[in-house]
Image (cartoon, rainbow, N blue to C red):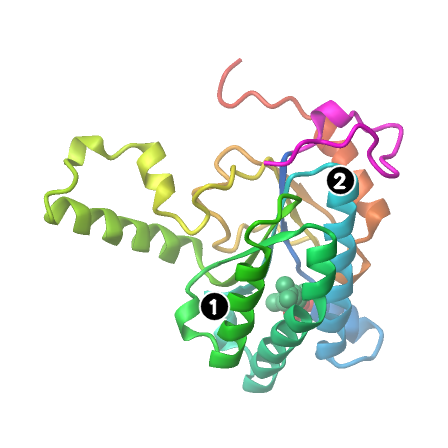
Amino acid sequence: MTTKPSILKDLPADLDRERLPKHVAVIMDGNGRWAKRQGLPRIVGHRRGVDALKDLLRCCRDWGIEALTAYAFSTENWGRPLEEVDFLMTLFERVLRQELREMMEEDVKIKFVGNLDSLPKTLRAEIDRSVEATQNNSGIQFSVATNYGGRQEILQACRSIAAMVQDGKLQPDQIDEGLFEKHLYTAGICDPDLLIRTSGEMRISNFLLWQVAYAEIYITETMWPDFDRQAFHVALRDYQQRQRRFGKV
Ligand code: FPP
C-alpha cells in the first residue's frame, strides 16, 4: 500500500485525512439515463462516464485514498443490445490504450477483476499490456471489474480450493477466511471501506459480495456522468459521520 504524502492536494478542509476510506468501490450507474435526459444516445453517457471515472481516480490519488475499484461490466451486462456491448468493449480498449501513459506518469497500478477469458482478444491484449506495464507502480491501486460477478467469483474460489483438497494439498479444516480471500480475484487488495452507487438504485447487483461485508454503503441520486469531486466530497463527509462498529457495540 502507498505511504500518504504529507500534504494532500486540495483535500477539503472539513475532511479528516486520518479517517478517509483506504479503499473506495463504485457502482457507476445511470450513464444511459443521463444521456436520455439530454436527448442523447446511451453511448454518449458511457463516454461521459469514462471522464467521470478518470476524474474520480485522480481525485482519490490527490486525496490519499489507496485503492479504487470500479464496476465497469457485469456478467449480466452481456444481455444488453449487441451494439451497446460492442461499443463498451471497444471503449474499454481505446481508453486503456489512450490512458496508459498517464497512468504511468501518475503511478497508477491497474488490475482487472472478473472472468477475462471471454472478453474480445484485442481487449485482453490491451488489459495484459496495461497490467504488466503498471505492475511495479506504487501509487493508487485501480481495479476494474470487467465481466465480473460476485457469485461467480466465489464459485471459482470454491473450485480452486476444492481442487487443492482433492490433490491432497489442503485439509478442509485449513479453509478459513484468510485462505478463501487468496482465491478471490481481489487477492491482496484490502476490502472496500466505502461502496458508492450512483443513480439512486438500492442494490448491490452482484458486486464484490464477499468483500463488501463491512463496507459503508452510500447511495446518491446523482447519475454517474455527473458524479464529480464535489459529489465525492459529500460522500466522504457522509462516510466520516458514520460509526463503523464491525458488529461490535
Ligand atoms: C452503467 O450505466 C454503466 C455501465 C454498464 C458501464 C460503465 C462503464 C464505464 C463508465 C466505462 C469504464 C471504462 C474503463 C476503461 C474502466 P447504465 O448503462 O446501466 O445506465 P442506466 O442504468 O441509466 O441505463
Would you say residue 7 sits in the magenta stretch? yes
Is residue 223 visible in the rendered image? The answer is no
Beta carbon of the mark 1 residue lies under 8 A of ligand 1: no
- The numbered dot on residue 93 is none
- What is the x, y in percent for residue 57? 72, 51
Which residue sits furthest bottom?
83
Q: Residue at x 80, y 28 (%)?
A: 6
Residue 105 picture quarter: bottom right
- What is the x, y in percent for residue 48? 78, 68
Q: State left or right for residue 73 relative to residue 173.
A: right
Magenta-colored segment: predominant secondary structure: loop
Q: Which residues are magenta?
A: 1-21
Is residue 71 visible in the rendered image? The answer is yes
From the image, tell me which residue sits under label 2.
Answer: 235
Q: Residue at x 69, y 57 (%)?
A: 104
Tell me the kind of residue under disc 2: Ala
- What is the x, y in percent for residue 203? 56, 51
Residue 193 picture quarter: top right
Closest to the observer, 205 or 129:
129
- What is the x, y in percent for residue 45? 75, 72
- The numbered dot on residue 76 is 1
Tell me the kind of residue under disc 1: Glu
Number of residues whose C-alpha sits closer than 10 Å to that of mark 1, classed few (under 14), some (14–19) or many (20 or more)? few
Q: Residue at x 18, y 31 (%)?
A: 173
Ligand 1 picture quarter: bottom right
Would you say residue 4 sits in the magenta stretch? yes
Q: Residue at x 25, y 52 (%)?
A: 160
Q: Is tag 1's residue or tag 2's residue first in the polypeptide sequence?
A: 1
For the N terminus, the image quarter is: top right
Q: From what the image shows, is residue 189 above or below residue 82? A: above
Q: From what the image shows, is residue 134 above or below residue 172? A: below
